[in-house]
Amino acid sequence: MATGGVTACVTKVELSISCRDLIDKDVTSKSDPLCVIYLKDGTTKAWQEVARTERIQNSLNPDFSTKIEMSYFFEEVQQIRFSIYDIDNSTDSLLDDDFLGEAECSLGQIVSSKKYVASLLDRSKKHLSKSKITVLADEITDNRVATLQFKATKLDNKDFMGKSDPFLELWRENNGGWTLCHRTEVIKNNLNPTWKPFSVAVQTLCGGDLSRKIKIICHDWDSDGSHDLIGECFTTLSELQDNSNKEFFCINPKKKAKKSKYKNSGSIFIMSCKLERRFSFLDFIFGGLQLNFTVGIDFTGSNGDPTSRDSLHFMDPVRPNEYLQALSAVGAVVQDYDTDKLYPALGFGAKIPPSHVVSHEFPLNFRPDNPYCQGIDGIISAYQHALPIIKLWGPTNVSPIINHVARFAYNAQTNENSPTNYYILLILTDGAITDMDETRQAIVNASHLPMSIIIVGIGSADFSAMEMLDGDNGVLRSSSGQPVLRDIVQFVPYRDYKKVGHEASAAALAKAVLAEVPGQVTQYFRGRNLQPTQRK
């Protein structure tokens, strides 16, 4: 009989999703489906969105190329829901999109069957439609990434009024069938296209088996979704890796069967194929990476008089205010990755002593030479001592605090040749940002640095203008049009996490705002070609 602790059985799995015979909600065309994936929280029983596929235009039989990576725990029942929507606009909200059906099961069902097929249910959960969803599960055992680039020459022309609009799809052989791995961009009106380089996980492309067969299909894109087949060819990742500029003849099976003199429908060339290890967030942490946490707190007048119970800064002796709840929830997670537990804590939007001039970048402990607080409790203590001696004012300018942290991140980027420091700025604010143009520029600049920004909206204000800072609805740009290099901002309203118990809401908030940080960390260091320091 074992006497030690039980070790959790956890592995990473990759889900591939496709649908057949979806409902057509569009009058003049076909539905434009997208799949939203939810997991049921084991504590609150609430469904939480964890991922989305890409939207496919004009298709009732979509094969989604976006792969969903999930942690699979053998000892847990992980309920998962797949909801299909017809997307007809560019907004992130699903409230104005047509619902096409959904399916629920456990992740264990998918893993055990490897090929899970279910009929989609309507909203009432009473009526099965003829629509089907198929989910394939593969264990992730290979952490390498293949970066590929293709070109083609002399492709068949499928358009009467112009030239073909070609794109490629890469499919891997899978138990006698084929699974879509990647879809390139469409190049309009070109019979000799060169596609942009793209990266795809080796696990996705061949399951780690470099000799597994890969099918490359070349289509002519049509706006109604009825893409014409130009041709296809077969290869392996091993062959692609060893034969730069190798030519593959693009064969159209129907043409070949009909025409005895048929040769090919053009040629596809592999221009480059490079395999690299994809380092995980934990690889960097194990290599000594420190996450440096800074908090910025809004002390503008719109928060209300701190001595009033209606104020967002009111210090209730029984229940912490929302500022302290959010700070504790996020800080409890981040503090485990910072060895010295010393955190700069800054305020903005208040008149401060001794001059009582408005400041948008002041240390909560009023020690500019040493703004660090010892642990999350130290930040809370500094906050409590600051409230009685400052005067809440305005406006809500957050760019100074972003630029403050960015200076430290810039120094780390300039002086460090290995992944040693990464900076996380938590901004707690009760309203719309006043210096939006300056803030957008500050974020664009910070996107080049080892830095992430988390913004939590406190209170019941209208935060719609804040959503633009979060790159989920498109690429954030400065007022001059300069785009961010990478998405580094996560915004959530705290009120979305008040519907459940205090502890559960704190855990849910921390999960929501920190979920993107590991990906942002690895993306930054990968873009700088920096590898984790190897442990001795």
Image (spheres, rainbow, N blue to C red):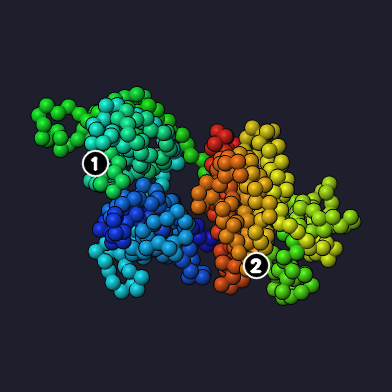
Q: Tag 2: Cα neighbours inside 10 Å, few (<14), some, or many (≥20)?
A: some
Q: Which mark is residue 459?
A: 2
Quadrant location of the C terminus?
Answer: top right
> Closer to the camera, 361 or 452?
361
* Image-based side of 269 in relation to 7, left or right: left
Q: Amino acid at mark 1?
A: Asp
Whether residue 75 is situated above or below residue 338 in the rendered picture = below
Residue 25 screen position, x and y as percent: 31, 61
Residue for point 26% across, 43% down: 227
List the single residue furthest toward the front.
Answer: 161
Residue at mark 2 to residue at mark 1: CA–CA distance: 53 Å
Q: Amino acid at mark 2?
A: Gly
> Closer to the camera, 91 or 16?
91
Q: Tag 1: Cα neighbours inside 10 Å, few (<14), some, or many (≥20)?
A: some
Residue 213 screen position, x and y as percent: 28, 37
Whether residue 13 is situated above or below residue 458 in the rendered picture = above
Mark 2 vs 1, N-terminal side = 1
* Image-based side of 300 in relation to 264, left or right: right
